[in-house]
Image (spheres, rainbow, N blue to C red):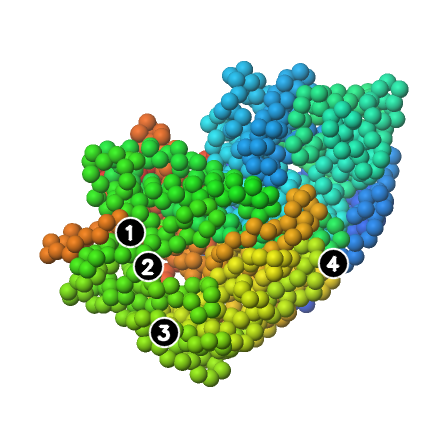
Amino acid sequence: MPLFAGNRRGGGLGHSFLPSSSRPVRPGRKLSASSSSSSSSSRRRGQFRDLLRVANSTLFGVGLLVSLFFIIVFLRFGIPSHFSSTSTSPSSRSRHAVIPRVPRKTPSRRFSSLSGGNLREAGVPAAAVVDITTKDLYDRIKFRDVDGGAWKQGWEVSYDVHEWDSEKLKVFVVPHSHNDPGWKLTVEEYYERQSRRILDTIVESLSKDDRRRFIWEEMSYLERWWREASSTKKESFTKLVKNGQLEIVGGGWVMNDEANSHYFAIIEQVTEGNMWLYDTIGVVPKNSWSIDPFGYSATMAYLLRRMGFQNMLIQRTHYELKKELALHKNLEYIWRQAWDAEETTDIFVHMMPFYSYDIPHTCGPEPAICCQFDFARMYRYGYEMCPWRQDPVETTQENLQERALKLLDQYKKKSTLYRTNTLLVPLGDDFRYVSLDEAEAQFTNYQKLFDYINSNPSLNSEVKFGTLDEYFQTLRDEAERINYSRPAEVGSGELQGFPSLSGDFFTYADRQHDYWSGYYVSRPFFKAVDRILEQTLRASEMMLALVLGYCDTSPCVRLPIAFSHKLTAARRNLALFQHHDGVTGTAKDHVVEDYGTRMHTSLQDLQIFMSKAVELLLGIQHEKSEPLSPSQFEPEQVRSQYDVQPVHRVLNMPQGHTQSVVFFNPLEQARDEVVMVIVDSPDVCVLQSNWSSVQSQVSPELKHGDLGKLATGRHRLYWRVYVPPLGLNTYYVALGYMGCEKAKPAVLKLASGISPLPCPAPYACSELKGDKVELKNRRYTLTFDVKSGLMNSVTRTDGTRTVVGEEIGMYSSSGSGAYLFKPIGRARPIVEGGGQVIISEGFLVNELFSHPKTPWEKTPLSHSTRVYSAENTIQEFYIEKEYHVELIGHDFNDKELICRFKTSIDSRGVFYSDLNGFQMSRRETYEKIPLQGNYYPMPLLAFLQGTDGSRFSVHSRQALGAASLQDGWLEIMLDRRLVQDDGRGLGQGVMDNRPMNVVFHILTESNISAAVAPSDPLPLQPSLLSHQIGALLNYPIHAFTSRKTQEVSSLHPPPRAFSPLTSSFPCDLHIVSFKVPRPLNYSQALPREPRFTMILQRRGWDSSYCRKGGLQCIPLGDDPLNLDIFKDLELLNARATSLNLMHNSVEMLGYIEQVEDAAQEGHALMSPMEIHAYKLEIRPQK
């Protein structure tokens, strides 16, 4: 059976996702006067970049480039008066003279949808041209941690007193309070003790003086406060927002982590906060404020740009990178995606220069001085005194001049680190402004200082309270007047005068060798729960949308309304966990319990909803059924409490009975794969929805436990299912049904280095002999060492052999904690010879289960390796690894458990890991950086690429950390148990480990075209096959079983299935979400007003692996997608929107200009790597 069927070219609207008529997409509208006047400049810059690319290819081109370079620079920039683009002297600063601005906008945004050929021509546009890459920074920096004096991680900063003679210094002091939605206290505890009072204080204090300003970020707290605030307070708050005194920055539910969070969850949490804010107060944020996440992802910059944000602020980046950027005055830059050659993803970024976001580290380079201006530290407010023993004092007439000049000196020194004369100075810390007295101390003392500075023209400075928006707007105005561009700087049409940068900012170090790579793995159990909640929420919202779209009976209308508040709670509980102390695993134990309990509650609620939706979509709901009445179905997997693994329900039916199993496919492609349920009897059989027999296999259920007691007595029942895209299909498991082919039992082979293993009934068993054993399917032959139970090699059927020395190891650590990873040397192997191995061989699944011997009486893990033999399925192509981990007990204190794959791939010290499940990032192992600094986040995928094009990929079901510490090695950390606190404020170690399963899908591939050198700075992309394998792992089929068994009779119920799509999507296109954002308003919507939303991603992929993979799979190609995708439903209205659903103007989002026109005609026009959101109105066909 082909994997994906259906002709995508031709046919009616109802039968193809590609346009069905010859009517072309309307050409882009004529540019407005302002944009057209600047387009010629953008074309010139684009031509110049093209020339750069071509010239580099030949010696003649190099000579031509040099000649033209100087001509173009002279014509474009003239001769700058004070200019020093390469000076690294920390004591000198020179700005550009005031030169008339030459307008420049983004290059003409052409639709780029190339397919076929090599990497650059497949699913990925050409590489971006930028001034700075983070790889270049890492290559250049020596990482010596030189002591800089007062600014310990910098240098002694000085300035020319005449620097601001022609353009005065404009300082915006931005009061803020960082409110963690859970860390040392739960979100509710923080709200009651601090956040509620802080919001009260903001309203009262700002209302006293219209010169005062404040910014607020977390909607989780604001929504909680709004619920109980008086109408007077709400009106005052709204007035402050509308008059510009109070700015909502970011406006997400939380300030999310950027290492572990999946991009789906990031979109959800920002959207949840932004929609609540717009519905409640009527504003949409345009500036992002992200001061506390531990490293920053390029994915976040992309998502914010496509949400309509204009500017970003970030703080926690490696201190050596900050110093390098500050030396060259590049702390403000344009962040561009590495794959974006068209400059459509550009967003302006301000990076804070110093150690922290607290007041001692924000006014200037000397924290001992800055701390003197944190007036909340004066004795009566309860904060600790300054560590430098120079404490703040009240500002009086007697000390006013001295204090004002000392503060201004810091401002001027800080200003020398940036290009413009507009300076940002945050004024706040964690949970500050908790009382009116504290707020008055800050506002009153600072206003006195500002008044003095502003009243002395000779100081050439203007200082005032400001919002983030006021800062960015003033900076942009200045950059429009003054040319801060440097010769040959690529820059950006988004905002001239600043360098362009691509890359990400992992792994973060705040001092010395303290790298924050531990949190990639801390609390891995809850990182796994996070992904399960994501999958379940996404599937639930799809089901809700399908119920409303297809079913107009009373139960169909009532069900979404009845569950609306629980769906909202689920979105908010998922959003809450994306907080940078949530999914990171860096909160106190009772806070983690609170997060876990919230997620567990939402998982239960969503599973109840899905069970009811299954009834409606299959048409077996009664008209008078109540929405909250029990469903006929229940989820096949269930959790008894928040901190235990899900378990499979055991199908237990009497003789002559059947039990139905319904599968929901949340993917946009049809699923043809092997599934598994647990049964108590091996004598069962499987029937399709039409009651024809399906071949099946039974194998013993094995478990981690006492040696010699590995079989549970239950059985795993495997069979192959077909489920349509976004659809349902029903199968029946029967016992004692005539004419139904019984499940075939697997054959077992046993080996034990301790005592003989008993043979579980009713299986045939034999003893494993020899030192090596093989596990096979049609695609792979795996070899294992019998004594250790570990894999040695992988050989594909084409003869390609990859050495894969599997190793289980353990780090010992001296200073590791929730945040930091500080190992003592390398991880040491822990598996000894003499463990127990069980091989189960069947016609569908072959498995090797290993319960290894380790130095401890209770081994910390067991593991299974599986290969599938279902012909023409994606499952044939991967190797499944499942590690059961129990790092519990004092034996494992200060230990960190890893698995390592030692391959024969010549990777040259480079590997690739994903950023938030959206894109890949190139990772190079540097000897000048300690081991822990070479660990990187692995939310979903990591792979090694050889110089011969061979590739070894590991897909993960949850966020973890990965490294390649030797050529050809890929190491992944599984769990960590740490007694000590690592000195970053948490005040405890990580000792609340839970038993858990970590699942990987491993893929080996060979490149059929020219190999890409590991030195190539552009991140490689997964193959289409790799994307499909990752989708199966991260978007599993949802299974539901009937609560009651049914006696077999001659009268069979009709086939029960649901297939809403006209055909499978192109295989490089993914539905990120499909939902009704406001189900309570569904019935009140105006005619043709869009009530549904769909977010689509067009994946970037590497075509050099496609044919080798053998996928019968059709990518999107050059044509737009037809959005009229549902059977029996009519698309009445479609419009492109931002990813947070707040903006309907695609121009402000950076998309190519034809996207909006295409959407109005019912088409999605998407370039590779892009994510688009659409508002749709869909109704049943008349």
The 10 Å Cα crowd at callout 4, few under 14, some 14 to 19, many 20 or more, is few
Tag in front: 3 or 2: 3
Q: CA distance from mark 4 to mark 1?
A: 59 Å
Evaluate if marks 4 and 1 touch, with contact meaning CB atoms under 8 Å apart.
no
Tag in front: 4 or 1: 1
Tag in front: 3 or 1: 3
Mark number, residue 759: 3
Q: CA distance from mark 2 to mark 4?
A: 54 Å
Residue under label 2: 677
Q: Is residue 1020 above or below residue 640?
A: below
Evaluate if marks 1 and 2 touch, with contact meaning CB atoms under 8 Å apart.
yes
Q: CA distance from mark 3 to mark 4?
A: 61 Å
Residue placed furthest toward the left:
1050
Which amino acid type is shown beneath numbered disc 3? Cys
At which x and y percent is residue 151? 81, 44
Residue found 76% across the figure and 33% down from its top: 384
Which amino acid type is shown beneath numbered disc 1? Thr
Tag in front: 3 or 4: 3
Which amino acid type is shown beneath numbered disc 2? Val
